């Protein structure tokens, strides 16, 4: 592998023998073939290392950590060892669509201001049975708005421009369990974050998922990132309890939900003020913000004190009730994935 390689696929492993062959084979069978495949075994105690060692494909670069140094340090180690212009993330229990690298590379090569390209995903279970699809937003401005509420790029489906990744300091160890959410925020400050609309990754959900094991810490760290985004991008300081209300819709006190409704309106106003010439982006956010406010009110529809707050929702989007019905139909009847931040 020479120094002109464009793509470095980076896959950490820790005791991932069960689904490892499927994950590796899905990369080796890509339609775009000129890549290096950096696989780092992070001190596994199962047969993961031996499984990879048996592959004879010259694109594979196998590295072994003598002790388990955890995901973030392993990722940063892989980035430092990579030769590619772009880092394509891969998890050892997922399956990549055969055209994943080709489609993402085509898009990021055409747009020098793009920092990361994600993709839509489809869930699979431990047996490989396909489930629900999630179509993430494509618009860069809309995705920046989404950073307030969740991580809008599926980490295992991301292709990242290496110079920008290194420019923001790589993965932040302090943000472990929300390192991807924080990274997308940092990258959004130096370039665009976008998604391919096609399903290019099959994300496996099973009992041993790292995310599933660390749900509470993931949520805590992600809410912290949301607070940072609110302050740094929109200039609005939001109390943790209020951000939890906005994010999780678990609001507790009446005062928290009242503040949450107002803050979503303020965040929309701040976004609209900074994107006056971007009609499409504003329309996306207009619908999203109004839906968020309406949903907060509907969660406590019995509290008459909140009914006047529907003003905030109607002020932003007069068609909010129509959009609310449409959202419910999509989720409960059509079973569609997330086509919007909400």
Image (cartoon, grey):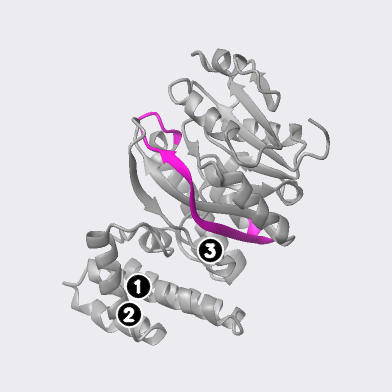
Q: CA distance from mark 2 to mark 1?
A: 6 Å
Q: Mark 2 packing: few (<14 Cα in 10 Å), some, or many (20+)?
A: many
Seen from the viewer's position, the closer of residues 271 and 123 is: 123
Q: How far separated are the C-alphas under marks 3 and 2? A: 22 Å
Q: Is residue 281 above or below residue 308?
A: above
- Identify residue for label 2: 320
Q: Secondary structure at mark 2?
A: helix
> Which x, y percent locates residue 111?
71, 61
* Span highlighted in magenta in the image: 186-210
Residue 224 coordinates in the image, percent (x, y): 51, 53
Q: Residue at x 24, y 80 (%)?
A: 307
Disc 3: which residue: 138
Most foreground residue, 211 or 57: 57
Identify the image quadrant of residue 288.
Answer: bottom left
| 10 Å crowding of disc 1: few (<14), some (14-19), many (20+) | many
Horizontally, residue 118 falls left or right of residue 171, namely left
Q: Residue at x 41, y 47 (%)?
A: 122
Quadrant containing the N terminus in the rendered view: top right
Query: How many circles with numbers are drawn on the protein?
Result: 3
Residue 209, x across and y down, in percent:
42, 33
Residue drawn where x is 33% and y is 85% of the image: 311
Residue occupied by mark 1: 291
Q: Earlier in the sequence, mark 3 or mark 2?
A: 3
């Amino acid at each position: 592998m020479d120094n002109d390689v464009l793509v470095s696929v980076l896959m950490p492993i820790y005791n991932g023998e069960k689904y490892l062959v499927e994950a590796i084979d899905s990369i080796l069978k890509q339609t775009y073939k000129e890549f290096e495949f950096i696989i780092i075994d992070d001190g596994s105690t199962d047969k993961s290392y031996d499984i990879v060692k048996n592959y004879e494909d010259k694109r594979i670069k196998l590295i072994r950590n003598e002790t388990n140094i955890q995901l973030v340090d392993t990722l940063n180690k892989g980035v430092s060892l990579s030769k590619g212009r772009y880092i394509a993330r891969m998890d050892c229990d997922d399956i990549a669509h055969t055209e994943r690298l080709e489609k993402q590379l085509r898009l990021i090569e055409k747009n020098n201001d793009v920092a990361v390209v994600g993709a839509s995903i489809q869930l699979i279970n431990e047996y490989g049975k396909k489930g629900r699809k999630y179509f993430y937003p494509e618009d860069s401005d809309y995705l920046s708005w989404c950073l307030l509420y969740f991580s809008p790029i599926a980490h295992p489906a991301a292709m990242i421009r290496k110079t920008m990744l290194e420019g923001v300091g790589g993965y932040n160890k302090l943000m472990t369990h929300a390192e991807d959410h924080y990274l997308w925020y940092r990258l959004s400050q130096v370039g665009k974050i976008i998604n391919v609309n096609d399903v290019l990754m099959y994300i496996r959900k099973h009992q041993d998922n790292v995310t599933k094991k660390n749900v509470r810490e993931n949520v805590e760290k992600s809410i912290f990132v949301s607070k940072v985004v609110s302050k740094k991008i929109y200039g609005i300081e939001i109390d943790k309890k209020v951000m939890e209300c906005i994010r999780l819709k678990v609001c507790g006190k009446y005062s928290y939900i009242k503040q949450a409704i107002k803050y979503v309106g303020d965040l929309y106003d701040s976004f609209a003020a900074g994107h006056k010439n971007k009609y499409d982006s504003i329309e996306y956010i207009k619908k999203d913000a109004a839906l968020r406010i309406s949903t907060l009110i509907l969660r406590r529809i019995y509290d008459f004190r909140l009914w006047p707050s529907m003003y905030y929702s109607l002020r932003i989007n007069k068609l909010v009730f129509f959009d609310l019905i449409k959202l419910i139909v999509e989720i409960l009847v059509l079973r569609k994935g997330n086509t919007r931040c909400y």
